[in-house]
Every structure is written in structure tokens, then in C-alpha cells.
Image (cartoon, grey):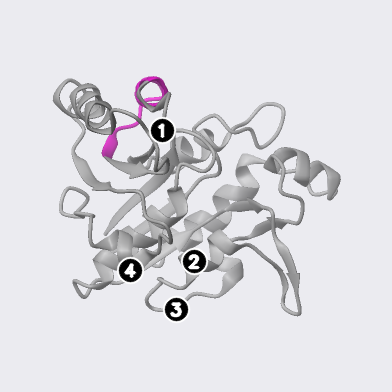
Amino acid sequence: MTACFVTGTDTDAGKTVITAGLLLAARRRGLTVAGGKPVASGCERTPLGLRNADALAIQAQCHPALPYDAINPFAFEPAIAPHIAAGEAGLPLTLASLERPMRSLLARNADLTLIEGAGGWRVPINERESLSDLAIALALPVVLVVGVQLGAINHARLTLEAIRGDGLTVAGWVANGIDPDLPRRRQNLDALAGWLGEQGGVPCLGVVPWLPSPSAERVADFLDIDPLL
């Protein structure tokens, strides 16, 4: 069984589509897969309750199928920072409250389990704890999704330093093209490969180009899950 925590260099780095793509890549090899999104804001009201598009994208790749609440136990309607949304909903988040359902998810013993964070590495869940504390508590290696745009090199280096400073390993990184007009794209990718790969020793799981309509099916074609397995 392999399990990882997926984080990004920032909000909208593309964590969800990469998470879903990695799960699909594993499914294509006949593996069982499970995904988690412990907390999500920006949810829509449905007859079944609050639903988050990112969590639904992850749920669509889970095999065997999983109930929504097992994937996303904490869902909030406003598209704001999770700890603020939780406070407004009168449902404060704690590390323990997130850890319990994610341990249950891991206990399903899928061949590959990915737990996706929210935003970047240091997104808070309350005044004292952050989502990074969940990865630490679960002792999971980390997959770093780098949203390739101006500033990505700095964000990627700082995030790598923070993850390692917290005592966790980085199992792999993905370059995800999110800016179709980024100048000197090749030079930026080469710099990321140098800092994260050659000097950082982190395997690259894939370079995903900018896609006008990214989906798990399209993204999976650019991903290599062998370093995770």
C-alpha cells in the first residue's frame, strides 16, 4: 500500500486535477485507489448536502467506490479560507477531527491512497494548527504540485524547504502548466528541474502542459506513478 499527501505551491496550483490524474493512472494499471479531501470550502448545496467540485473529482476516481463523506468529511459553502469558513459555520476544525476520518480512509488499504490538502503547505485549520500538521500526524510522504507560473520557482523551493523542515519526505513533484502565456516556459521548467530534481533529489512525476480543459483523463497521460509505487 502506498499513501501520500498532496500539496501545492499555492491555491489553484492544480492539486485536484493532478490528484485525480495520479489516481486514474494507478487505476489504468489495475490498482485499487482511494482519495481524500479532508476539508473543502466553496461547496454547493445539493439534495444530498454540501458538495465540493474538487472532492467530487476525486470521488469519481476512487475504486472501489467510496461514499462522499469518507472523502470529504468537512464541507463549507463560502469559497474562503477553511478555518474562516469553519468558524462562520460554528464547526471549528482541529487536527484530531481531520485525522480520524483520514485514518479510516487509509485503513481501507487501497494500493494507492492520496489525501489532498487545501491551498498551500501552511494553510491554517485553526489559530494553532495547519493542514501540514495532518500530513505530519499521518506520517505521509508528500507529492508537491507546482503551478507553473511567474513566481513558481521561489514558491516551490520554499515549500520543499518547509516540508523537509517538518521532517517529511517529498515523494515526487509535478509541474502543472497553469499560465498559457508564461514567458520563458522552458527556462522555468529547467530551473524547477534543477532545484527540485538535480539538487533536491525529488523525482519528477510529470510535466503537464497548459490544457484549456484539464481533466483526469488528459492529465494522466503525462504522469508517471512508478516513483510513488
Considering the numbered disc 1 on the image, is that residue within a helix, a strand or a loop? loop
Q: Please tell me whether residue 165 belongs to the stretch shown in magenta.
A: yes
Give whichever of 160, 223 is nearer the camera.
223
In the picture, the disc for residue 217 is: 4
Q: Please tell me whether residue 212 belongs to the stretch shown in magenta.
A: no
Give whichever of 17, 138 is nearer the camera.
17
- Which mark is nearer the camera, 3 or 4? 4
Q: Amino acid at mark 4?
A: Glu
- Which mark is nearer the camera, 2 or 3? 2
Considering the numbered disc 3 on the image, is that residue within a helix, a strand or a loop? loop
Q: Amino acid at mark 1?
A: Gln
Give the magenta range: 154-172
In the picture, the disc for residue 149 is: 1
- Circle 4 packing at 10 Å, graded few (<14), some (14-19), many (20+), is some
In the picture, the disc for residue 57 is: 2
Dot placed on the residue nearer the N-terminal end, 4 or 2: 2
Q: Is residue 156 left or right of residue 75?
A: left
Dot placed on the residue nearer the N-terminal end, 2 or 3: 2
Relative to residue 7, is residue 56 depicted above or below?
below
Dot placed on the residue nearer the N-terminal end, 1 or 2: 2
Q: Amino acid at mark 2?
A: Ala
Dot placed on the residue nearer the N-terminal end, 3 or 4: 3
Q: Is residue 70 left or right of residue 44?
A: left
Considering the numbered disc 2 on the image, is that residue within a helix, a strand or a loop? helix
Q: CA distance from mark 3 to mark 4?
A: 18 Å
